[in-house]
Every structure is written in C-alpha cells, then in structure tokens.
Image (cartoon, rainbow, N blue to C red):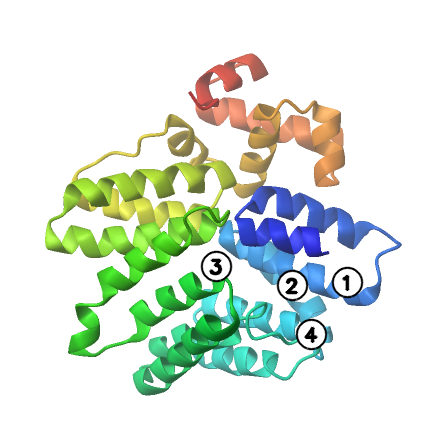
Amino acid sequence: MDSLHDLVRRGLVRAAVAGLVDLIADPATTSQDAAVATAMLAECHLAQGELGAALALADDLTEADDLARAHHALGELASATGEPELAVERFRAAAGGSGADDLLVPWRAGAALALLRTGQRVEALALARAQHDLAVATGAAYDVALALRVLATTDPSVEAASQRVPRLRTALQLLDGVEAARLRAQIETDLAGLLVLTGDDAEALALLRSAEAYAAREDLWPLQSRVRRLLDRMGEAPRRAQSEALAALTAAERRVALLALDGLTNRQIAEHLLVSVKAVEGHLSRVYRKLGLSSRAALTAALAPA
C-alpha cells in the first residue's frame, strides 16, 4: 500500500491506477486496505478526468464511513460534481476518520478550495494558513509546496496578490530534486496563468510545455485542458500530436491505445484492464477508425513520442 501511495505522490498516475486495480481485485487484500485503495483509485480517476469511473466507486467509499481517506475522496468527488458545500462536509469528516493524518490526508487544503467556491474566503484562508503552518512545522518539501499552492489561491488580500507569483516560485524551488511530477505540473500551470496576465509569455510558455508533456504522459485530461486553454490564449498550439489525437478518443479507447503504445499484446491489455480480448480488439478498431489508421504499427508511428 505504501508503494502505491508513493506512486500517486510521485505523480505516476497510470502506474498507480494499474496497481490499485490489482490490489483491490486480490482476494488476499484486507477490507481496510481495499477501502484505502478504492479511495486512492477514485482520486486517480478524477485526475484523469474519468468522472464516471470515480462515481462508480462512491457507494463503496460511503460504506467506509470510518475511514479518513474515503471521506477525502468523497470530498474530491463532491468538488468535481459541483457540490462545494458537500465537499466541505466530507473534507471535515476526514479529520476525525480512521487513519487521519493531516499531511497524508490534507483535508484542510481540499476544504479551503471548496470554501473558496462557496464565497467563504475568510474561513478558506484560515484553513489554508493552518495547512501551511502544519506543513512548515512537520512536513517535507512536497507538503510545504502543496500548502503554498493552496495559500496562493485562497488569500484574497491586496498584499497577497503581489505574493502569489513568489509563493508559486518558492513551491517549485522546493520541488527541485523531489519526484512530484503532478504537483509540479499543477504549480507550473498556476504560475503560467499568472505570468500570462503580466505579459511574461516566454516563461509562461516554457512552464506550460513542461506541464503539457507530463499531462499527456499520464493521461491527465483535466490538467491538459487547463494547459490548452492557456496556450490558446497565448496563440500557441499544442505541441504533441499524441495529445491532439488522443483527445478524440473515449477514456476506454485512450487506455487501450496507450497500453498498445507501451508494447502490450491484445491479451496482455485485456488482462491488465480485466476485460476480454474481444473488447480490446473492438476498442482498437474504433481507435484506428477515428485516427484514420489501419494497424498497430501505424498507431505506433503516429502517436509514439519523438
């Protein structure tokens, strides 16, 4: 379980999803570990923009009502479905759940962002500051960087406006040498958005290209969409032909196509995704048709990163 949490923290979302699915399906997995894995899987699905897959886990998460991680995942689900008040309740419930750890399960950060969406800025800022103080006192660079990102978002004061860029720069500096690709890409995108407003397009573009490459590798379509909107605003086109092509596919088709690009056979893909070989063949046929291709070799030639 610790190794899977480490994959998520490192931003290796695709590998984490595969490992979590295997763990949940393993009959030897305890009910407690399965519940924690289900919560982590739901959050990974949200990161990849697979809202339906995440929502399909909601009942299992609700049943694990004594588990901090389950409440946190339900908070993320509520935020994703436009229910910030419910999200705040879920995040606060995580504080008293089994396995509660204010850094491992950063409920204050999630609640602060949800409160911001409800207009409760004072309370949001108080939680963001509390998360930052806790991270500085006891956390690692990752935890401080995350807290700085939330603080840069939630502080509405005039003084804070001038500190948003420095705070995000500090957060990126803290992540130097730390394997935290997703958090880094999120902060890069946040910082790029601020730099676009000030006309610093050169640095903003470099940050967006970095985030774009990572988001495409890990199939993180919500992050990729944020990057694209900023690139569009700058008059820049997406760099990667792969991301452009994969955007035309459904989530299931993308998963199959990416596993095919990794060199897996149809049978290996079927075993990995817990589906039939016929289902894999059907997905690949639709992928070929949508992309105007005729074979796996053509798929590799068209979409493999340079």
Residue at point 69%, 31% (across, down): 269
Q: Sequence-wise, which precedes: disc 3 or disc 1? A: 1
Q: Secondary structure at mark 2?
A: helix
Q: Amino acid at mark 2?
A: Ala
Residue 109 in sight: no
Quarter of the picture containing the N terminus is bottom right
Select label 1 or label 4 by which is in front: 4
List the residue tagged with mark 3. Answer: 142
Q: Judge the density around disc 4: few (<14), some (14-19), many (≥20) Cα neighbours within 10 Å.
A: some
Q: Quadrant of residue 164?
A: bottom left
Residue 223, relative to residue 304: is it above or below? Answer: below
Q: Amino acid at mark 4?
A: Gly
Q: Judge the density around disc 1: few (<14), some (14-19), many (≥20) Cα neighbours within 10 Å.
A: few
Select label 3 or label 4 by which is in front: 3
Q: Quadrant of residue 31?
A: bottom right
List the residue tagged with mark 4. Answer: 99
Q: Sequence-wise, which precedes: disc 1 or disc 4? A: 1
Q: Position of residue 293 (x, y in %)?
A: 49, 17
Q: How far apart are labels 4 and 2 at the CA level?
A: 13 Å
Q: Position of residue 244 (x, y in %)?
A: 37, 32
Residue 46, relative to residue 147: is it above or below? Answer: above
Q: Sequence-wise, which precedes: disc 3 or disc 4? A: 4
Q: Amino acid at mark 1?
A: Asp
Q: How far apart are labels 3 and 1 at the CA level?
A: 24 Å
Quarter of the picture containing the C terminus is top left
List the residue tagged with mark 1. Answer: 33
List the residue tagged with mark 2. Answer: 39
